[in-house]
Image: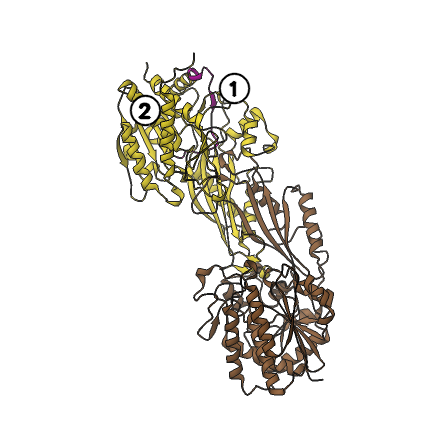
Chain colours: A yellow, B brown
Amino acid sequence: MPAPIPANLDRLATDARLLLEQLCRQPSIAAQNTGIAEMADLVEAEMRETGFTTRRFSIPGAPPILYGELKGGPYTVLLYDHYDVQPPEPLDLWESPAFEPTVRDGKLYARGTSDDKGEIATRLIAIRALREELGQLPITLKYIIEGEEEIGSPHFEEIIKPHAKLLKADGCLWEGDGFEPDGRPELGLGSKGLLYVQLDVQGTGKDAHSGGAPVLPSAAWRLVQALATLKTPKGHIRIPGFYDDVRPPTEAQLQALRDQPDTDAYMKESFQLDRFIDGLAGFELRKRQAFAPTCNIAGLTSGYGGEGSKTVLPAHAMAKIDFRLVPDQDPSDILAKLKAHLTANGYDDVRVTVFGNAEPVVTPIEEPFVQRISRIAHAFGDQQPSITPLFGGTLPLLGALRRHVGVPGLSVPGDPVYWANGAHSPNEHVRLEDLRRAVHFNWYLFQELGKK
Amino acid sequence: MPAPIPANLDRLATDARLLLEQLCRQPSIAAQNTGIAEMADLVEAEMRETGFTTRRFSIPGAPPILYGELKGGPYTVLLYDHYDVQPPEPLDLWESPAFEPTVRDGKLYARGTSDDKGEIATRLIAIRALREELGQLPITLKYIIEGEEEIGSPHFEEIIKPHAKLLKADGCLWEGDGFEPDGRPELGLGSKGLLYVQLDVQGTGKDAHSGGAPVLPSAAWRLVQALATLKTPKGHIRIPGFYDDVRPPTEAQLQALRDQPDTDAYMKESFQLDRFIDGLAGFELRKRQAFAPTCNIAGLTSGYGGEGSKTVLPAHAMAKIDFRLVPDQDPSDILAKLKAHLTANGYDDVRVTVFGNAEPVVTPIEEPFVQRISRIAHAFGDQQPSITPLFGGTLPLLGALRRHVGVPGLSVPGDPVYWANGAHSPNEHVRLEDLRRAVHFNWYLFQELGKK
């Protein structure tokens, strides 16, 4: 028997869209420090409008973490979201401007629609609906919304540490998950660790005419050759000791992956791809995706990038690399190993700057809060949830939450995301049907969690 | 015994500066198709003012090559210059506007002062002086001035081919050279060939969240790994057959390099450099610079290049590569070998686009025209000339001149250039003392060439 449906779901879905459009019209790009203060004001006002008593957790030089409390039944849930977004570049690939929310073909397009303003909107609208309907929430909510998630939550730990007691709860619902293409609710039990570094090489002091290439040091070649030592063409990461602390998946985790539906075709369509690495498919694809640590090139820049030719020998070359780490890899240990590897291979001149450092965090499938949420998610659409033991992405704040608050957490399908919503990419969007479904799910979940 | 000095040299130097200022006030940026037609009119008017009978060699869709003839003694010399300039960007690095000629500290600053309007000015002023003084030039001059040199002379061959007979001469003076820091006149006997290619790799169809890195193909890694196969960290180019056609330098060429003054310190200062590749210095440095073919990375672009971090798996990666080639390497052959190498190493997916293709051209030291010029240059200041058998840069037009006109050529110190004049860079300038010296040299050279 699937979950009941609120009588006014159409209006709630519209309200969620309007609120989401409002949130997305305000740019809030942490990497470029654009619109963050304005966004914090706007989100805090909407939290208050929803009934939360709010305050700000702040330290100098960082955007505030918004904290809201809304008292109801005794069961207490901590919610986490973020009000910042990724940079919108490359701008010319957007079909409508990144910060002008636009509906096309049943989808709402704008930076932040899926990551992560959509979930803020659906949670707030569901809470407003329940308060209107029931007078009081059946559970007590604590809500933290930060402003630096997209740059790796660099101040999260320092900001929340003094408030750890305040954040105690029976469980935490992280930034959220959606539904599989076959309609099964998704639960996410962990996120990979991250080490994000920038590698810089300086060759000559200024750009030179490329006629000098026989005798002038080349920053670009130096960088390419240093990078080539990091990984074999087959994908094996060559930093000594990189794989030492990789913990093998448990049988329950592997079983969860076996039970998931195949979404290979959707992923191929989403990424406009003919073939995954090594021709992977099905369970083997999901297993590699969940449990393989990575060394990804997120950016490469040197010299002339325009049309046609310019015969220049660039003075400087830069690469951005992100390592995604699995339990029990430690980002600081991997950084030390990376530096040792560069030194051992004679690349002492490659300057390493760290822009992100987060540990992998996994909640066991056996955890009671996970089991409870799993039953509610199952009941919602009368379909078994699809459990991902470890996501490819990183929520750097989870390590701090685990260390200081100690609350078990997971992501649930209260976010209007789906497999092709283009998070972090041009034309990010949500489907309006998912927005409606997410409001419905949050409305159901918050009620069910209030029951014994 | 050094060369005589014209009685009115002060006035000639002033005239050259005024003419150069006039030429530089008119932008003529081939890459941006700016001011080219106006510049052609202006230069043609100045050629006529000097006494040349002019005409235009034209094809549809390309700026004209200006052709001028000025009859005098029977010995016939072909002069080559170009009236276009490099783009002035980055504009904010100019201390005075690029197209507002400005004198500071005995230097004239503007785009084109050294490359190559300065030489047009000094040649025209020297010719005017000789005609005024002698009534008639002691030699016959043919002068071609093109408008696309800075974008690789893409139409030069097609335009001059029908006029090849008209261009026959006893020798050709290319775009010019200057004086060494120790005052020795410079002669340049050749320019390297060029193969300029862009390498493009497409991984996924669109940018992805880097959390997908375990299973998604990476364009950036693919490009880095393809590039790494092209060259060893020590600088050896690994494309099979790349060095097959490299002709070893002759003893005369090596002797010319041995006889050149050391300019290592000036070059280090110019490039803000502590050390050349492999710690090279002196003769070994000059030998490597002259005779080594290169594979230079002129540009690298993929993913995020901004501040801080963005966790993206870029869909596309691009490199721009310029190969500088020495005799008898052939750019079309090197292109075929590059493609074969990529295929043999499994990089068929790396797309190769050609943006430049020019053969190396070298005039032998033993050539009588070179020997004659060399004696005149020696006599000018009673100092042995400094002979560079092969420059690091490329003059793509030289191949067409050799094939169709067959006239032996070289560059001579009639250009007001010096080691730090910032050609192709912000704050391009000439020293006023070099302008004066270049007028003097041209005045002397044209007279001496008229003698038996």
In screen coordinates, is B144 left or right of A346? right
Q: How crowded is mark 2: few (under 14 residues within 10 Å), some or many (20 or more)?
A: many
Task: Pinpoint residue B432: horizontal percent, then vertical percent.
Answer: 50, 76
What's under tag 2, amino acid-wise?
Ile
Residue labelled with disc 1: A259
**Residues at marks 2 and 1 touching, judged by CB atoms closer than 8 Å:** no
Task: Pinpoint residue A314: horizontal percent, then vertical percent.
Answer: 53, 56
What's under tag 1, amino acid-wise?
Asp
Task: Single out the mark in the foreground, 2 or 1.
Answer: 2
In screen coordinates, is A431 left or right of B367? left
Residue at image location 45% in from the left, 21% down from the top: A185
Q: Which of marks 2 and 1 is nearer the N terminus?
A: 2
Subunit of label 2: A
In screen coordinates, is A152 left or right of B110? left
Subunit of label 1: A
Task: Pinpoint residue A326: horizontal percent, then vertical percent.
Answer: 47, 32
Nearer to the camera, B350 or A109: A109
Disc 2 to disc 1, C-alpha distance: 32 Å
Q: Is the N terminus of chain A in the top left, top right, bottom left or bottom right quadrant?
A: top left
| Count of marks placed on residues | 2
A391 part of magenta stretch: yes
Q: Can residue B439 be seen in this view?
A: yes
**Secondary-structure class at tag 1:** helix
Give the residues drawn in magenta, as a range: A378-397
A263 part of magenta stretch: no
SS majority, magenta:
loop
**Secondary-structure class at tag 2:** helix
Q: Which mark is residue A127?
A: 2
